[in-house]
Image (cartoon, rainbow, N blue to C red):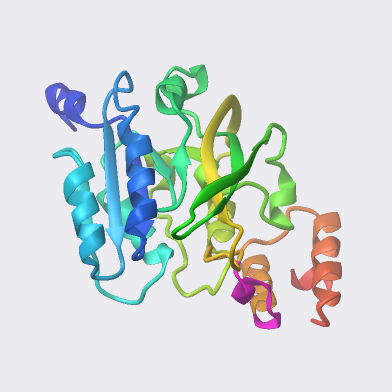
Amino acid sequence: MIHGDLMAELPFFTVIVPTHKRAVLLRRTLASINAQRDGVGGVEILVISDATDGDTDAACAELLTPADMYVRRNGPSGPSASRNMGLALAKGAYILFLDDDDSWHDGFLPALRAQPAVQQGLPVYFNCSIVNERRGADAAILSEGGADLAGRLTDEIYLKNQIPVCCFAFPRALLAGLKFDAHMRAYEDWEFMLAVYARQKAVHVPLIGARIFKDSGAESERRGVSQQSHDYNAVFDYLYVYRRHPAPNADLGQRRASLLNSFNIPVTAEMV
């Protein structure tokens, strides 16, 4: 049992930020979190880097506080292993994930802390905006549009991914024993979300939280959006997810089979 005085010192939010040699973008991410630490009961940032990079070291030294942690881990690169390390280190009552090129809207964390569903300890999801930007020497924001995700989290998640992982806030206890699959080439976020969904469905809160940035000048560097995630081999990751998380009803099983059949993968509804 945790003593009451110690419990009061624990952060309410842990934000896990995997990063890979993108210090300029990481600075924006960290600044957006730092700007809203007040009034939330404590925020802990865990930056997990999968590479040695002096610019990332400098950004973290400048922008992280004594309440935060920066880890340069060993092993293969990729966000899954970094997020898993963050999960193992997190101390907050709630856990959020934020990629190193994304950010929070101003005032989001205090507004999230005040939500009745969060005060009741429920998993929640929230809205986001999609920002198209140009990166490099002539960096600029090209456009931004909101995405209302209310009602989007349904059993359709068993067919395909519905909501970005950065649009959720999870009670830490709900994630006990869960990990991102570091061996998947793509869709590891979706596989993780299915495992969480099977434990407890999140409720929507009417807030706009994440700003999800997309680089309009190149094929995105994001896992799950890159060409690697769309090629024929990655379709087998769909089959992998389907086999790990059986369809909850016959209709979704048939729709899964039809989707895979369209990629010339001969499966039946009973197989997925």
Specify the quadrant that holds the C terminus: bottom right
Q: Is residue 66 left or right of residue 255?
A: left
Up-down relation of residue 72 to residue 211 (above or below): below
Residue 40 picture location, percent across and down: 33, 22
Image spot of residue 209 (x, y percent): 52, 33
Question: Within the image, what quadrant is residue 33 found in?
Answer: top left
Residue at 37%, 73% in the rendered image: 77
Q: Position of residue 79 (x, y in %)?
A: 42, 63
In the image, 246 versus 215, the foreground residue is 215
Count up the numbered dots. Answer: 0
Q: Which residue does the image show at 31% across and 29% down from the upper left?
A: 12
Return the x and y of residue 224 as percentages of the image width and height.
59, 64
As for residue 229 lying within the magenta part, the answer is yes
Residue at (60, 76) in percent of width and height? 228
Q: Quadrant of the N terminus?
A: top left
Q: In the picture shown, does residue 55 fall above or below 163?
A: below
Quick check: 135 above or below 265? above
The answer to which quarter of the image holds residue 31 is: top left
Q: Find the residue positioned furthest to the front.
A: 138
Q: Is residue 175 left or right of residue 154?
A: left
Q: Nearer the viewer, residue 218 or 71?
A: 218
Using residue 31 as the reference point, say whether residue 148 is left or right of it: right
**Residue range corresponding to the magenta coloring:** 226-233
Q: Is residue 139 covered in magenta?
A: no
- Work out whether 200 lies above or below 191: above
Q: Residue at x 64, y 76 (%)?
A: 234
Viewer-closest of 111 and 102: 102
* Magenta highlight: main SS: helix
